[in-house]
Image (cartoon, coloured by chain):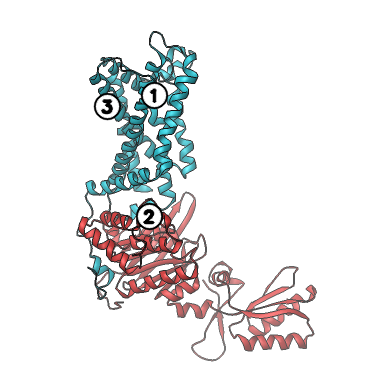
């Protein structure tokens, strides 16, 4: 991938105060974002966060109520036509015509990008070759497996040779093998110089593919940075336990907090308690020792990776209850901050 | 053709300019036609459905309907052909709504294709499928005993008018599909066409309806449209002007609505 972009080249995306409304619902709320060209950018967020709306706005399908969005310096409202010439969109649904063959689908889309007949044939052939669709290219798309259909859809978004590929949840609903195939295709494209903006629910997907991750929630950017940096903030382990006697859950929670210096979550009236444990195994041993000293009987205790829900919780609304661990680069004690 | 040391964008190249309206609408139309022709439930069912309705009117209800001096089959078939699109055209609204919910419309809208090409392509394709409906319906009409009252030329003129109506109704159904949130809703919305078809002079003389209903029948577009077809068949042209005026009005009102709706979809 070309990481060198001349300083004068316009950024891939530039959103200033970008607001999108559907009736009374505010899908994007004064979103601010600048992303340089030459990147794979992943938009991460829970359902309803505004991921799809953001992609649709970039694709000129949604008109912002307020603010500004520039794609390679071109305004999506004032100059949608020239934005459309730069992009290829593969949405959440495989938007291919099931009664047409893969090749027919690709050639049609190529013509709609503006290719002539011969160029469209060449573009379709190139995509069929690169996305390993040769065996099924002349069968109707309706007979394809889910993964094949998704690859065909991806191919259709590529036949115009776009500078920016928009992928809205490209692997949702795919089996692991198909998922990996899509990932490989994305990597190859990125290496070939295509910019990619993708949305995903999956932390690992962002981790695998993205140079830069933007976490959005309630239509606003809550965190942004390279995956490694973000993981330091949200990729914490969690200690989870359940006590034998529900009356002891409070005491167990106090131990969890004392050891990890984090706020524990207690199941109200129940027996479960959990706490973020950035220290991992040593903290788990310390907790077990402390529980034994306090003679609190425990049915189950373990260390697990945080679920994506917890990661989002940590970065979004529940910040006051669950602090985010920030590795202290100055040395000394671990410090915590509330995520904004 | 493609060599592996080229990246995909290099192998493909980028189009110099966006597609022309003609070529883009051609591609849109071609795809809609392929879908229609390759989906038996669409192209065959439309024919079966129209034949069944015609059969019922002609042989089931027809005996109880008296239309004066002409036989009921001669009264029925011209107007049935003229209005068959109101029954089969619901499929157009459904197809348009399906494209929207299946993400196909999003793909099209993200391409550098002019919005009028989307409407034009859709209208061309569905007009053709609707012409297929009226052609087969007319054939069934003859099979069920209809005979041209006048010359072949008059018959062709009347048929030409029916083709024009097919285009008009197509535009209306495209708009319905664009406004419907999903295919089921589009199906439901298209039922409103039944109201206009039935409360008109198409299947029974309007004068046989109760007095309070007759004004609706008289002042809605379908009545002058079918009356014009009947008058052309017998060599007259008395109502054609009004029918054409309605047709033009419907197209002029609904086409921009469709284009604007695509722009905001």
Quadrant in the picture for the N terminus of chain A: bottom left
Q: What residue sits 75% from the left and 77% below the top?
A: A243
Q: Are marks 3 and 1 in contact (CB under 8 Å)?
A: no
Q: Position of residue B131 (x, y in %)?
A: 32, 33
Chain in red (letter): A
Q: Which residue is mark 2?
A: A140
> Considering only vertical position in the picture, is B192 above or below A30?
above
Q: Which residue is mark 1?
A: B80
Q: Position of residue A171 (x, y in %)?
A: 46, 66
Q: Secondary structure at mark 1?
A: helix
Question: Dot 3: within a 10 Å radius of its alpha carbon, few (fewer than 14), some, or many (20 or more) residues?
Answer: some
Question: Dot 1: within a 10 Å radius of its alpha carbon, few (fewer than 14), some, or many (20 or more) residues?
Answer: many
Pair 2/1: label in front: 2
Chain in cyan (letter): B
Task: Tell me the number on the disc at residue B160.
Answer: 3
Q: Toward which corner of the image does residue A316 lie, by quadrant?
A: bottom right
């Amino acid at each position: 991938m070309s990481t060198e972009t001349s300083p004068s080249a316009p950024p891939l995306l530039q959103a200033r105060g970008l607001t999108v409304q559907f009736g009374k619902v505010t899908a994007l709320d004064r979103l601010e974002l600048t992303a340089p060209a030459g990147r794979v950018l992943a938009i991460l967020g829970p359902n309803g966060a505004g991921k799809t709306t953001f992609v649709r706005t970039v694709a000129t399908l949604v008109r912002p109520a307020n603010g500004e969005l520039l794609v390679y310096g071109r305004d999506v409202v004032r100059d949608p036509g020239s934005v459309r010439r730069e992009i290829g969109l593969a949405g959440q649904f495989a938007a291919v015509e099931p009664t047409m063959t893969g090749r027919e689908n690709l050639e049609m889309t190529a013509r709609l990008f503006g290719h002539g007949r011969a160029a469209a044939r060449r573009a379709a052939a190139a995509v069929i070759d690169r996305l390993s669709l040769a065996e099924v290219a002349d069968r109707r798309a309706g007979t394809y497996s889910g993964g094949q259909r998704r690859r065909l859809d991806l191919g259709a978004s590529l036949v115009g040779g776009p500078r920016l590929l928009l992928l809205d949840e490209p692997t949702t609903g795919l089996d692991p093998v198909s998922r990996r195939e899509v990932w490989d295709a994305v990597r190859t494209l990125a290496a070939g110089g295509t910019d990619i903006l993708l949305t995903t629910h999956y932390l690992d997907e962002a981790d695998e593919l993205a140079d830069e991750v933007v976490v959005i929630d309630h239509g606003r950017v809550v965190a942004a940075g390279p995956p490694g940096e973000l993981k330091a903030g949200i990729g914490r382990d969690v200690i989870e336990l359940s006590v034998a006697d529900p009356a002891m859950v409070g005491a167990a929670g106090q131990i969890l907090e004392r050891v990890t210096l984090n706020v524990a979550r207690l199941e109200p009236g129940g027996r479960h308690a959990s706490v973020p444990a950035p220290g991992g195994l040593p903290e788990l041993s310390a907790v077990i020792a402390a529980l034994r000293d306090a003679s609190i009987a425990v049915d189950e205790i373990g260390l697990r990776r945080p679920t994506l829900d917890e990661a989002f919780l940590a970065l979004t609304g529940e910040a006051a209850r669950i602090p985010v661990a920030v590795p202290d680069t100055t040395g000394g004690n671990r410090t915590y901050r509330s995520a904004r | 053709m493609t060599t592996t040391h080229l990246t995909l964008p290099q192998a493909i190249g980028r189009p110099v300019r966006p597609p022309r309206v003609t070529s883009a609408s051609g591609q849109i139309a071609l795809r809609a036609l392929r879908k229609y022709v390759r989906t038996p439930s669409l192209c065959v069912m439309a024919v079966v459905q129209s034949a069944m309705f015609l059969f019922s009117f002609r042989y089931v209800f027809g005996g109880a309907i008296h239309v004066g001096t002409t036989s009921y089959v001669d009264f029925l078939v011209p107007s049935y052909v003229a209005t068959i699109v109101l029954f089969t055209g619901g499929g157009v609204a459904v197809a348009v709504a399906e494209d929207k919910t299946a993400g196909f419309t999003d793909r099209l809208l993200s391409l550098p294709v002019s919005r009028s090409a989307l409407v034009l392509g859709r209208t061309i394709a569905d007009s053709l499928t609707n012409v297929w409906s009226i052609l087969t319906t007319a054939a069934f009409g003859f099979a069920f005993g209809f005979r041209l009252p006048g010359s072949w030329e008059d018959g062709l003129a009347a048929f030409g008018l029916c083709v024009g109506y097919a285009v008009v109704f197509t535009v209306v159904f495209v708009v319905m599909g664009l406004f419907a949130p999903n295919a089921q809703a589009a199906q439901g919305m298209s039922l409103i066409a039944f109201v206009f078809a039935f409360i008109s002079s198409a299947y029974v003389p309007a004068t046989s309806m109760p007095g309070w209903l007759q004004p609706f029948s008289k002042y809605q577009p379908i009545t002058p449209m079918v009356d014009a077809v009947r008058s052309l068949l017998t060599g007259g042209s008395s109502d054609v002007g009004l029918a054409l005026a309605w047709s033009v009005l419907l197209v002029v009102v609904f086409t921009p609505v469709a284009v604007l709706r695509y722009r905001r979809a």
